[in-house]
Image (tube, helix red, strand yellow):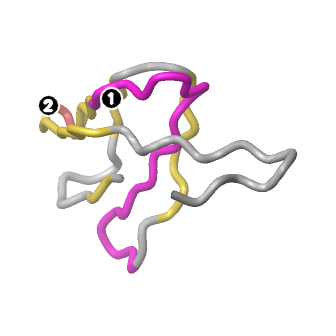
Amino acid sequence: MDLPRPGTVAPLEPPRDLIAASLPDGRIQLAWSPVDEAAGYQIYRKAPGEIDLTEYRRLDRVETYTDQTDVDSLYTYT
């Protein structure tokens, strides 16, 4: 196990059990298992026509988020 350098904080594990559910009107509900000691979460998203995942939303300590998409299509989240 690698230990953090003095003065740094070891990164937390990412959330587990991320699920996404399609909702009416182009909404996508995301939910995940919380991570102890996390101050918040960074959602990355790949929308239609995009090549890579990009930083999308920074959230406080929540366990769900509903994304209002612009177009009905396939989206990828992490």
Amino acid carrying label 2: it is: Leu
Q: Is residue 72 left or right of residue 76?
A: left
> Range of the magenta residues?
32-51
Q: Tell me which residue sits at (84%, 49%) in the image.
A: 6
Q: Nearer the viewer, residue 15 or 70?
A: 15
Magenta-span inclusion, residue 42 = yes
CA neighbours of label 2 inside 10 A, class few (<14), some (14 to 19), many (20+): few
For label 1, the residue is 66
User: Where in the figure is residue 58, as x and y percent of width and height?
Assistant: 58, 38
CA neighbours of label 1 inside 10 A, class few (<14), some (14 to 19), many (20+): some
Q: Nearer the viewer, residue 7 or 61?
A: 7
User: Where in the figure is residue 72, as x and y percent of width and height?
Assistant: 19, 52
User: Where in the figure is residue 5, as x and y percent of width and height?
Assistant: 78, 55
Q: CA distance from mark 2 to mark 1?
A: 9 Å
Comes first in the chain, label 2 or label 1: 2
Residue 39 in the image: above or below residue 77 = above
Q: Is residue 53 left or right of residue 64?
A: right
Residue 34 in the image: above or below residue 30 = above
Contact (CB < 8 A) between labels 2 and 1? yes
For label 2, the residue is 23
Amino acid carrying label 1: it is: Thr
